[in-house]
Image (spheres, rainbow, N blue to C red):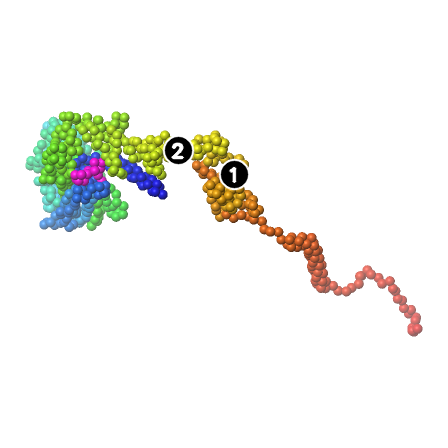
Amino acid sequence: MMHQTLLVFFFCLFIAGIQTQFADDENPCTLAESCGACIRTSNKCAWCGAENFDKSAHHCDLLTTQKRRCEERYITYPQSEFKVDKQESWTSGDNLKPPVQVTPQQITWKIRPNDLRYFTLDFKQQDNYPVDLYFLLDLSFGVSKAETRPRLISLGEEIPKKMKGITNNFRLGFGTFVDKKLMPYIAWTPEIQEDRCQNPPCSDPHDFKNQLNISDSQTEFATQMKNALQTLSLNFDDAEGGIDGLIQALDCDSIGWRNISRRIIVYCSNSIFHLAGDGKFGGATRQSNLKCALKNNEYEYEKIYDYPSVSQLASKLREKKANVIFAVMDNVYKHYTKLAHLLDGAVVGVLQNQSENIVQLINDKYYELRSRIKFEPRNSDFVDIKFYSSCKDKSIERETSVCDNLEIGDVVKFNVSITVNSDICQGNTGGEVDKDVIIDAVGLNEQMLIQLKVICECECERAEHEIQKSDKCFAGNGTFECGVCNCNEGRYGRKCECDESEISSADSLKQCINPEKNDTGVCSSYGDCICGQCDCFHLSFDTAHRYSGQYCECNDYNCPYGPDGICGGKSKGSCMCGKCVCDSSWSGENCECSKDTKSCLASNGKVCNGFGDCLCGKCQCERNSGMVGPTCEDCPNCPSRCSQYIDCAQCKAHSSGKFNRFECDKSCQNVTLVDSLKSGKGIKECDGIDVDGCTFFFTYEYTPSNDVLIEAQKTKDCPAAANVAAIVGGTVAAVVLIPLLIICLIILIRNRRDAKEYADFMKERDRAKWESGANPIYKDPKSTFKNPTYGGEK
């Protein structure tokens, strides 16, 4: 029992060792060599700063592991902390207070690198949100032609009425564009321009002109729009310079944009647009600087700077948090749709003939913009931010930063995950890195500010806690901090005991790698390389012993265990580098197999009867021979061998037969007494007659190791004594009484049948109802005649 307990114990230790090694292979913490690197690796890593720490263990390891190995006072495990700095309540705003739709507005995270954290961001759709609406109209012949102009002029009156149904807090402004005043975009002489615009005459072309600043004067808006659209302008090519106008309208604060409002530019045109590169044909070769440059309300540097690119336009829209409604004719709808897909906060609508649907289009597209919220992080390099929300569904949360179809008063919640990449700490020497990340509400002048304080180093690494030129680091050749030595230049090793001038660290590592198994790592991953020599670790499950070998490649305590110990015990073999080396009399993986063949000799003196091999003191019979048994002398398919085992079964179960008690105990140890015998495959059933004439029963079978098992039934089957009276009586009954009984039975059956027939006859007779009568053809043989003359009697 003791041997079995030891076997189970060592087996558990062996499995624990395998699990530990597997965990190390999957554990990223163990690769970190300093406390700062440890806490930057994963939020599961913790540093143990104990000075006398087990060399086979890692100073940086999983927190769960450190709690078992390291005292709590030496464990460094900084945790991320969250704080809300500013959280104003939702409001529509007024002249004194700006509107609030996003909350909270500012938070602080003291956070570890690679530590996944979550926080909540809420948005509520407010009514009467401030709106600044700026119209940017194509003044070239097309959109502003004669039949369309009245409809555009009417915008001055209709738009204010429509906007009042959306919000009471709105302002209006507008500007116009044609193209750069450069050949080949417009006429290069006044004469050509006049020739092309004779009736009606054309106004001078311009790349962009601010006709009216954004204001709440609805009357002035209507008047200025009517005046601006009285005369057309003209350019030569199909494309227009509207993108220049968009950039100026977005960047020029002088136009009148409010700090907190939904900024919307309505861009109306019937032509495609120029993009970066087109301006070089006219001599405008410099890349657009995206800066406001208005002089007398007109773009001043149109002849110097090229048209903006799509990416520049997208960047400016994000910067100014504005929206664009492209209200264009059907012939260019596809062009503007492709452009809008590349811009955040842009939508496209088709103007019908004579622009008669422009008011409804603006209304519909405004609702499309207003009913959508999208959040976008800014200044988020080294920071991974993801948004999760169920929007209005309230059930299934998915990864998204966008929610659509929002109505006034709707509240949507975003769960935001944030992870800081450890690369943010590169080059840092101050312990913490400060970084501000902004989450913008696209198209709105609202945002959340995230102030990050990234933990890059441990507290024990600060200058006030380190010990320079410490005696703990081989004669002062290093700085002792966080329980380890940070070696001076030219020194290396766990205690800075190695000198680069004597052997370089690279050469040292090469000498510690097994050339025959160079994929096992330095010192086979079971030791430290100290100046080119392996210092082997203690066994993880038995700290009283170490790994061995030049490269720590051997484990002399990792051999199979038997009942008598490792490799069968000291008398049978020893463990060398993970394998059992057996003594001359023993063999096998764990040296438990005896080479002695005495127990395998058959009755004929042959080893295993010549039908097998003697392994570990037991016969392994040849399969094709058909022989089984301890010495391969039994043949299951041959006649039964009951006679071989009958004497043992008889003496054990009934104390009779050939063997006396002493002989029985000596020769019949493999017999078991049972109340009833079992049957099945491989079990042979036998019986015999005991001295008292009773029948006794027993079975035998062979185990997989060819041992014979005999079971004998405790009870016998004995015949009962003869009963003479019963035998005589039975004979008389069989000879006399049974025939008499048969005769009586026949008579009884016949009488019952006759009685039944008589009764049936009587019933039939009583049932008959016939009348008496003579046969009509019957004639009586007698005839009587009377004499008529005879008158008297005799």
Whether residue 519 is situated above or below residue 656 in the rendered picture: above
x then y, percent, for residue 677: 49, 45
Is 606 placed left or right of 774 in the picture? left
Q: Amino acid at mark 2?
A: Ser
Q: Amino acid at mark 1?
A: Gln
Instruction: Determine if residue 335 is in view.
Output: yes
* Residue, disc 2: 594
Q: Looking at this view, is 466 or 661 the one in front?
A: 661
Please report the residue visible at 71 percent of the width from the left and 64 percent of the height from the top. Answer: 766
Mark 2 Cα within 10 Å, few/some/many (few <14, many 20+)? some
Span shown in magenta: 48-62
Q: Secondary structure at mark 1?
A: helix
Q: Looking at this view, is 32 or 162 the one in front?
A: 32
x then y, percent, for residue 430: 11, 38
Circle number at residue 158: none
x then y, percent, for residue 83: 15, 46
**Is residue 53 part of the magenta span, yes or no?**
yes
Mark 1 Cα within 10 Å, few/some/many (few <14, many 20+)? few
Instruction: Name which quarter of the figure residue 243 lies in.
Output: top left
Q: Secondary structure at mark 2?
A: strand
* Residue, disc 1: 644
